[in-house]
Amino acid sequence: MKKLTTLAAITLVAAVIGMGLTGPAMAAQQDKVELCHVTGSQTNPIVLIEVSGNSLDAHLAHGDFSPTNNGIDDESIQCAQDFIIDADGIATPLRGISPATVTVFAGANLTSFPSASSEGLDWFDNDADGAWTIGVDAIHIERNPNGACPTAIPNASHEVGFDCVLVDVGNNLVNGQPVDCDLENGFACSAAELAAFKYHDANGNGHYDLGEDLVLDTNNDGIFN
Ligand SMILES: [Ca+2]
Ligand SMILES: [Ca+2]
Ligand SMILES: [Ca+2]
Ligand SMILES: [Ca+2]
């Protein structure tokens, strides 16, 4: 019993010391916020800075903004307002973001769909708002370009286990779900729906190739910025 009591006391003391050490440190960490700071400079217009939580509102009020979730440790990518939908062009449900797969860069020209090629990219507008919704909408591959999806069934609907999921972060695709917009030929898509979708034509051949970065061009200016 004595042993148990002693052990309990030691545990309690350790917990108190632990709290004393980590409590203020954690509060200080949470107080710092990363922001993309608009400098007004032509040559270096946006820089990534760390500010205190107290000054956050003042920074936002003069046009600073939170880094996008572009998932790559490059200031010019993190501080772009445009968003990389998919970087690797292969059938994985996440976005395939890594330094090896991201080819787009700040100031790069973006190219619109349709791309008049045969990658079989189809968009599922899961929240039916006519626009790409990050983390909600999905894209699958419904053909077999370059051996990317040998099981694909090209019938304008999603077959689980056959058509290949390119990006479905929210895991929303269901079996038999009809395609909302066929990206490469523009079938079933309005011009307004297609407007935000772009790709970085890294090899300059005038059409989308699997592996080129699919991008949400938030300000629709044809430039990754
Ligand atoms: Ca949507
Ligand atoms: Ca299908
Ligand atoms: Ca290309
Ligand atoms: Ca843009």
Image (tube, rainbow, N blue to C red):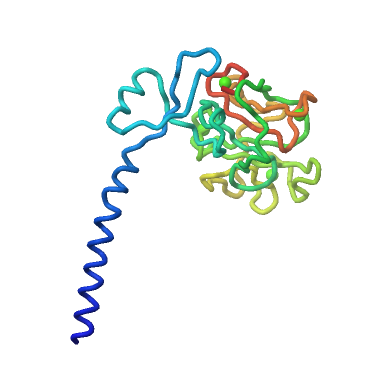
User: Where residue 71 sits: x, y (%)?
Assistant: 54, 39
Q: Is residue 193 left or right of residue 200?
A: left
Vertical arrangement, residue 197 with respect to residue 5, above or below: above
Residue 72 appears in which quarter of the rendering? top right
Residue in view at x 67 percent, y 54 percent: 161
Residue in view at x 57 percent, y 48 percent: 174
Q: On the rendered image, what quadrant is the N terminus found in?
A: bottom left
Vertical arrangement, residue 131 with respect to residue 11, above or below: above
User: Where residue 15 sits: x, y (%)?
Assistant: 25, 64
User: Where residue 54 sits: x, y (%)?
Assistant: 27, 31
* Ligand number 4: quarter of image: top right
Q: Is residue 91 left or right of residue 65?
A: right
Q: Is residue 104 left or right of residue 116?
A: left
Question: In the image shown, does 204 or 121 lie closer to the viewer?
Answer: 204
User: Where residue 223 sits: x, y (%)?
Assistant: 61, 19
Question: In the image shown, does 115 or 53 lie closer to the viewer?
Answer: 53
Residue in view at x 26 percent, y 48 percent: 24
The tally of labels here is 0
Question: In the image shown, does 193 or 147 lie closer to the viewer?
Answer: 147
Q: Is residue 64 left or right of residue 149?
A: left
Residue in view at x 30 percent, y 25 percent: 57
Residue extending furthest toward the bottom? 1
Residue 86 appears in which quarter of the rendering? top right
Q: On the rendered image, what quadrant is the C terminus found in?
A: top right
